[in-house]
Amino acid sequence: MNSASLLVTAAGAHLLAVMSPGPDFAMVSRQTLAHGRAAGLRTAWGIATGIVFHVGYALFGLGWLLEAYPLLLELLRYAGAGFLVWMGSRALRSAPPSVGMPAAAETAAPARHDFLIGLATNLFNPKATLFFVALCSALLTTPTPMTQKLGLAAWIVLTTGAWFSLVALLLGLPAARARLAAKAWLIDRAMGLVLVLLGLGMLLAPLMPT
């Protein structure tokens, strides 16, 4: 496969991967529904920043570390599973707002909090790591100009941020949030359950039959 075909294939594969439901999608949805559109957007770009790290080791050939030391990937899997279960368990404790008190969905948090949640969700996702290790191997075995690699990197980061920003914008529409406000705590619990299940699935993945 020549470099142009490889880049087009990689760009398309990433677009399909980023649009597939998973921990990143669940976290952006949860943060948007629980804390509003701005929180969702910050989470989205935290995820995109995590992609910068993944793209970095793919471009500079550092994926061999994970191939040579599979324990690193195992540690990453445990960290990712623990993070998702922790975030999900927090959401599961959501309760209906008291009379006269603002709904939980309107509570404020430091802006960096949402960004860091998105960053951690992506960095601790072993599936993302495996995708970029595979990309790294392909880029190293096919002669590819650095300008094309950088173009692919920019595409991957920007499409990730754009996709999850779109998710946050749609879920954060005033009409949608107004309709969901009364049940915000139930939705938060539901998203918490999704996060816990994703974390447990990540933890138990090696035990599943292939």
Image (cartoon, rainbow, N blue to C red):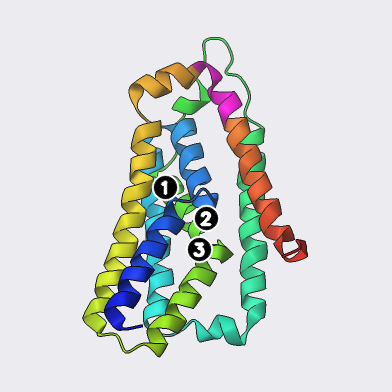
Write down the residue under mark 2: 121
Write down the residue under mark 3: 123
Q: Amino acid at mark 2?
A: Thr
Q: Which mark is residue 43?
A: 1
Magenta stretch bounds: 182-187
Q: Residue furthest top?
A: 99
Residue 90 shows up from this direction: no
Q: Position of residue 17 (x, y in %)?
A: 46, 58
Who comes first in sequence, dot 2 or dot 1?
1
Q: Amino acid at mark 3?
A: Leu
Who comes first in sequence, dot 1 or dot 3?
1
| Crowd around label 2: few <14 · some 14–19 · many ≥20 (10 Å) | many
Quadrant in which the C terminus is drawn: bottom right
Q: Tag 2, which secondary structure?
A: helix
Q: Which mark is residue 184?
A: none
On screen, residue 72 versus residue 31, left or right, reads right
Q: Amino acid at mark 1?
A: Thr
Q: Tag 1, which secondary structure?
A: helix
Check if mark 2's residue and mark 1's residue have beta carbons within 8 Å. Answer: yes
- Residue placed at 62% from the left, 38% from the top? 192
| Crowd around label 3: few <14 · some 14–19 · many ≥20 (10 Å) | many
Q: Position of residue 125 (x, y in %)?
A: 55, 61
